[in-house]
Image: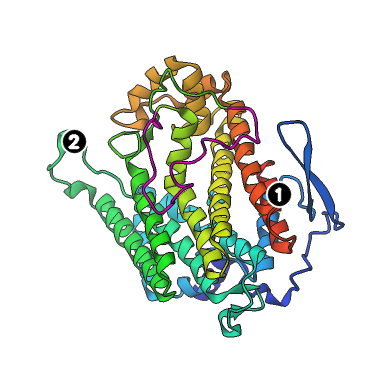
Amino acid sequence: MAMSKVIRLCGHLRPWSSVPSHKVVLHPAVVVCPEVRPFATSNGLQEKLATKTVQKHDWNRAVSEAEKIVGYPTSFLSLRWLLSDEIANVALHLRKLVGSNHPLLKTAKTLIYNDKNQQAWGLIVLLVSKAAGHVATIPDMEQDKSAGVLHSQRALAETTEMIRTSHLVHQGMINLQSFDNAGNDLSGDSDMIFGNKIALLGGDYLLANACQQVATLRNKDLNVLISSAFRDLAESNFIGDRDEQNNPLPTKPTAQSKELTTDLNSLEDLGFGDLEDNTEPMKIDGIVGSPEKEWSLRHVLGGGSLLGKSCQGALLLGGHPESLQKQGYLFGKHLSLAWQACIDMQPFLLPKLPMGAQFSLVSAPVLFHLEHDHSLYDEIEKGRKSIDNIDYAKVHEQVLQGPGLEKTKILQRKHSVAAMQVLNELPVTDARRALQNIILAMQEL
């Protein structure tokens, strides 16, 4: 019985190495012939990308086909991890939280069911590794020839998944006492205390394993790179205003905030000092209060840095020159931001917010609307103690009446174009097409 549950959680367990890399199995409903799909740019021209067909609106198919190209599913929830004693113990303890409404349960559900909002970064790292290839001097014993990547690159992809998962698990902790009640007895909140312990220890366990795996790769430059990604994730929790549960709140836009450019090819001002040396802390002067820059900084620190530096690290392990490694960083960074913009738009594609539903108050549509209409900030101010005090239906309604959603679409396409430009520097392969298909599928989510 236990093994059957594991099989249902893991999905595909058979490696896809038996499927040739040049053949992709498609559903009969999808036209199998290759096609050229347009990617519109700001000047009215269409950048044509030779890609294999991806069924419209089918994000899952784009990811599934990409997984076949790199060998097998790259989710953190692999059989190897599910059968480990430590993870089994954590899963056993999680059962005790059922019915307690602890936020860690929501995190666990997202990871198990592989929600499309949970970005498959390990998969992206492997696709970048295979698309760029590796230098010929790397010994055969270090290569996974069936998947077309190095064993070290696969280990780095797993590490990326572990770091991201540990960050999400740590964010499942809650503050059990307000500042006014600090020091009072918490005996009545035993379930919540237990949930916090599991979130803390579970996240620490994953993080420790990730550090150990990076160390076994024995590459000093990679260690520095991934360590700086750890630092960025930690710093992301201290950007801008927060409520008492550390949920982020938007900063009131300044009068000097720069208007979002509608030129999709204009990629200036998309850096925070990381374009010169991305191992140094990012520059935040003048960022908070400017909607596009504040949004970008939050999400670069909160994940884009990790994906970008993992892609950069994969090219480092492949023996590529520093110039191409930096392009790998830019690709991961822009892909992550394009992905986040898609996620931010989802609640605002509905004409009316469902009863009791919430969304991120630092999502791009909200930040852009606050720049357009400062009066909405009066509602945001109600969330200083807790974001639950905010009328989300009112915020949702007002954002739909402003330019926030349209500007977010521009923002998403801007970062998609930036990621596509990096891909165009790589040779045409199945892996590159898979990455292009993922970007194209994001336009239709």
Q: Which residue is mark 2?
A: 179
**Residue 244, position as x, y percentages in the image:** 27, 36
Front in this rendered view, residue 266 or 180: 266
Label 2 crowd bin: few (<14), some (14–19), many (20+), radius 10 Å: few
For the residue marked with disc 2, what is the amino acid?
Answer: Phe
For the residue marked with disc 1, what is the amino acid?
Answer: Asp
**Residue at image x 12%, y 42%?**
184
Q: Is residue 145 above or below residue 313?
A: below
Residue 413 horizontal side relative to residue 98, left or right: right
- Residue interval drawn in magenta: 261-288
Considering the whole magenta stretch, tell me its main secondary structure: loop
Front in this rendered view, residue 11 or 428: 428
Residue 256's disc number:
none
Q: Is residue 285 magenta?
A: yes
Q: Residue furthest bottom?
A: 141
Residue 261 horizontal side relative to residue 214, left or right: right
Quadrant position of residue 388: top left
**Residue 346, position as x, y percentages in the image:** 58, 36
Q: Is residue 423 above or below residue 151?
A: above
Q: Is residue 256 above or below residue 143?
A: above
Q: What's the distance in space between the residues labelled 1 and 2, CA to CA?
A: 46 Å
Residue 124 horizontal side relative to residue 381, left or right: right
Residue 58's disc number:
1
Q: Is residue 99 visible?
A: no
Label 1 crowd bin: few (<14), some (14–19), many (20+), radius 10 Å: some
